[in-house]
Amino acid sequence: MSTVLEKAATQPEPLSMTQVRRIGFQTIVIREFHRIVRIWSQTILPSGVTATLYFLIFGTVIGSRIGPMDGISYMMYIAPGLIMQAVINNSYTNVVSSFFGAKFGKHIEELLVSPLPSWIIVSGYVAGGVVRGAMVGLLVSAVALFFTHLPVEHPVIVVGAAVLTSVTFALGGFLNAMFAKNFDQISIIPTFLLTPLTYLGGVFYSISRLPGWARHLSLIDPILYMVNAFRFGFLGESDVPVLYAFAIMIVAIAGLFTAAVVLMTRSSGLRE
């Protein structure tokens, strides 16, 4: 009798659902971090090389012919845009490649049968995208400092814009991965939608330089608001109202997160 009581006393208490969810979320994020670091030559380094080429070609060669943009040196003007461009691409790419890889390797089924709710799974993958976006953003920022001085007028806006943008495109990558049926389909949106919107989103120019029709057309591009909010945090200069930009990002996150959770709950595109 005493032996039975001793064994019962030494057995650990069962975990609560809150603890299970916390451990599950941490596990997904840690796994994503290890994946990013393990293949750093594919996930981190290319953005640093690309940013260096952008600064050399656009900032030094072309920038010397363009001159100041809205009273700011061209090199300094494009720096926030190039950082944001790297954050957008990497946040999106990390989630779409990781989640589709889980589908392709069939180990997504382990998550589907686990006690983790859909919103925890979505949040874990999105957090992994934000981690990679932050790491690449810091690398590109370091590269920028080699070419120009980059003041920070509003640190809270810089961090807020970077995080909200990263979350937005990480969610976009999650949705892309859910419906992609092969590796070709995970590159369609980045190639034909994400890249054009980024280049037309005010990374390399101010929309005040555009003719009226082009300026109004540019205002449809959501990336324009993200880039300008981020630039305002550094330089105090923006082509659009910053509060409006933050409102767009928050609404986009709410809509994309809701869609991702609903589709994940239904296992849409995951059991085919």
Image (tube, grey):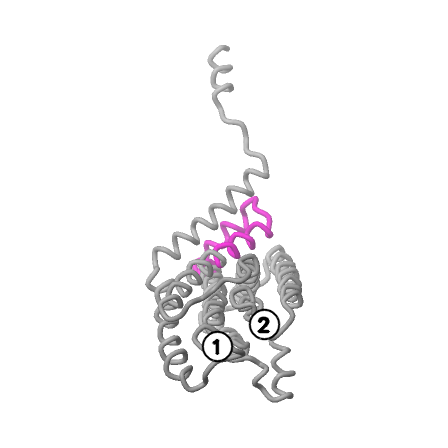
Circle 1: residue type: Thr
Residue 235 position (above or below residue 31): below
Left or right of 126: which side holds 140? left
Location of mark 2 (residue)? 238
Question: Chief secondary structure of the magenta span?
Answer: helix
Percent of width and height locating residue 52: 36, 72
| Rendering quarter of residue 201 | bottom right
Instruction: Give the farthest residue toward the front.
Output: 71
Circle 2: residue type: Ser
Location of mark 1 (residue)? 191
Name the quarter where the C terminus is drawn: bottom right
Instruction: Give the farthest residue toward the left.
Output: 41
Q: Across the whole image, how many numbered discs are drawn on residues?
A: 2
Q: Secondary structure at mark 1?
A: helix
Q: Residue at x 57, y 44 (%)?
A: 115
Q: Which region shows up in magenta?
A: 101-129
Q: Looking at the image, can residue 60 be seen?
A: yes
